[in-house]
Amino acid sequence: MPQGLAINDVEKKEINKVFQRLFRKIKPKLKDNDEELLKKAFQLAVKAHDKQRRKSGEPYVLHPIEVARICHEEIGLGPTAVTSAILHDVVEDTYVTLEDISALFGPKITKIVDGLTKLDGLYNVESPQAENFKKVLSTLVEDVRVVLIKMADRIHNLRTIDAMPKAKQLKIAAETSYIYAPLAHRLGLYQLKTEFEDICMRITDTEFYEDIETQLKETESDRSKYIRNFLRPLKSRLNEHNIQYRTTARIKAISSIANKIRKKKIPFSQVYDLFAVRIMVDVDPSLEKSTCWQVYSVITDTYTPIPERLKDWITTPKGNGYESLHTTVIGPKGRFVEVQIRSERMNDIAERGFAAHWKYKEVKSNENVFDKWLNNIREILDANHSDALEFLNDFKTNLFSEEIYVFTPNGDMRILPKGATALDFAFEIHSDIGYHATAIMVNNKLVPMGFKLSNGDQISVTTKKNQKPKEEWLKMVVTGKARSKIRSAMKEERRKKGELGKEALMRKIKNMKADFEENIDMLVKHFGFTSRPDLYFAVSTEAFKVSELKIFTVEGNKLVLKEEPKGDIAPKEEQTKTKAKFTNRSKILVNGESADQYQFVLAQCCNPVHGESIFGYLTATKGLKIHRTNCANATHLMANYGYRILKAEWADRAASNFTVDLLIIGVDSGVGVIQGITNAISDRLGINIRSFNIKGDEGYFEARISLVVLNKDQLNVVIKEIQALEHVSNVTRIDKASK
């Protein structure tokens, strides 16, 4: 943490004022010695962070106070969490030790602060960091407040991220998209999840974000008028039924709109469900379900519903406790409108997730929804992971956003991620059932183990004691639990076989009159194995034969390579090969210096164009690759290999050509479609077309065209020119990663 000027008197007054605002809001919840601990934490934080400042220049202590406010007001946490939030950086960044915290605040707050200290900066997936992350997750299953406070910490850092250098912003956005946003969704923190995704998009895809934001502002007046007209007849009918309710209308998140535009390949003007209307009823928990369905009846009596868009998460809540009834109806002017119906209790849980869950333990529908998920996390923590990425990936599969509901032969329901297979189900029931599964039936029909399950499927599993997991099983499962259990079983089986291989190798080396321990590591290295167990396993499976040791002789106790017979020396290969001609080398700077020092290439997955925001990724074997910051692979690379990411930028002038692929969708008028597109590109703009493929069917055409452009500005002109053609519906950029 950089040191700066000490807090002055004016700043002290402001800091005290900010804390007093927080104190007044949380005071009604304070019990026993909560007030004493809270004030003591504030005083310690002010003293410890006295000479520390944020990148913006403001006193650093304002950050933990704001994190504490978010914990209380936006997440709904109580005094213990708020006190811990104020202290969350003192051990990490100041002279204060964990022992000091323990002496002043006791074991409960100390444990939370310890967890928070471990959580900072753990996502670049170097092994020590991943090990720390694993320790933090063990804290998660004991006290979820650790992660909830970190969520508040991260959202405040994102809200104030503009003061950070762009390269740092990109790394923070990547780890947020990779871990924090899915975790927020899994914990039911929908507002935070949405804000995480919106801010990350603003950082990684600024132009697209600002374009949608501008169009939302331009249509705001019409949208507000439409919502009023839509609600007027609904309110009239609801009032007739004497239902206590309130309504809100929320605009869909910019990131959500962007995903819809990308997924459906449509322009903004064709995204009709830009907002959702929410109706919240205020009734006793025993009347919630019937009242929500009564409201649904009123809505569908007023407007025509679209049956396939009905989503009933009241009868069957989501795996993270979310309860709501969603329907889409056709409103005035034929526009689709999504309506969400829920109780105030359901809304509280939808807004605050895990934190609100504990307030409603007595409500049966919400019972144990998080306990089951946390049990899965415990099982993943218990599994041995030799590789840091392996562990993170297993954990991340438990953060799925889409779910399916399937049933055992006895009718017990299980919630699995969308895309889960029959074998995933076997492991979900019990690890032993998964290990020994031999045949699986879905809806009384025998299916392959990799069969993808659907909502409502009923599954039965046949087992045999002598059945064991196989390597190919890893390709048949998607859940972290199944993956980790299969890997554990494979490692144990590999270890047992390796013991046999080790014995065979020891006998051979002993027969050669050499010492095993003095030679084994040399053999591992010489024959290209990564570890002793890998060599032992290769011997046991005969992938490596002990007879290959005949190339060695013994000197003392050591194995030494036999001398090669002398003869003509083969011509020595050139030490250095002529560097390949990499395009656009002179126009890219890496970490502020000319990229000539690197053998770099433009990544083929996203084909960056001069003027677009870019970064460098140093691969293990293929040099430096330059990606767009909004590349489909960017989040994965930055979150998992942050230590290989280099700052990259274009030099001022462009001198080369760039290849870009576009997808054009439109109405197949039968005549002149191809000519119209090629005229617009080649004749009017003078752009070189490298390839052009088009197919039409039943009045619809889809064309993929590869162009050569000079820079981003020229690309934008091309897209606008094609979009303006009479029969064209939409034009989008396509990457190899999204094909």
Image (cartoon, rainbow, N blue to C red):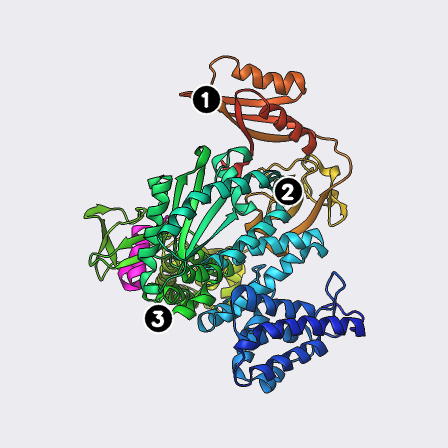
Residue 152 placement: quadrant: bottom right
The quadrant of the rendering that contains the N terminus is bottom right
Amino acid carrying mark 3 in the image: Glu
Task: Relative to 147, say whether 279 is above or below.
Answer: above
Magenta extent: 418-435
Residue 8 placement: quadrant: bottom right
Residue beneath label 3, please?
A: 362
The residue at the point 76 percent across, 74 percent down is 12
Q: Neighbour class for label 3 at 10 Å: few (<14), some, many (≥20)?
A: few
Label 3 – label 2 distance at C-alpha? 45 Å
Q: Nearer the viewer, mark 3 or mark 2?
A: 3
Residue extending furthest toward the bottom? 103
Say which of 372 and 548 sits in front.
372
Secondary structure under tag 1 reads strand
Residue beneath label 2, please?
A: 210
The residue at the point 42 percent across, 50 percent down is 340
The residue at the point 42 percent across, 56 percent down is 245
Q: Earlier in the sequence, mark 3 or mark 1?
A: 3
Percent of width and height locating residue 413: 28, 58
From the viewer's perspective, is 548 left or right of 496?
right
Label 1 – label 2 distance at C-alpha? 33 Å
Q: Earlier in the sequence, mark 1 or mark 2?
A: 2
Q: Neighbour class for label 2 at 10 Å: few (<14), some, many (≥20)?
A: some
Task: Relative to 34, say whether 729 is above or below.
Answer: above
Residue beneath label 1, please?
A: 695
Amino acid carrying mark 1 in the image: Lys
The residue at the point 47 percent across, 73 percent down is 143
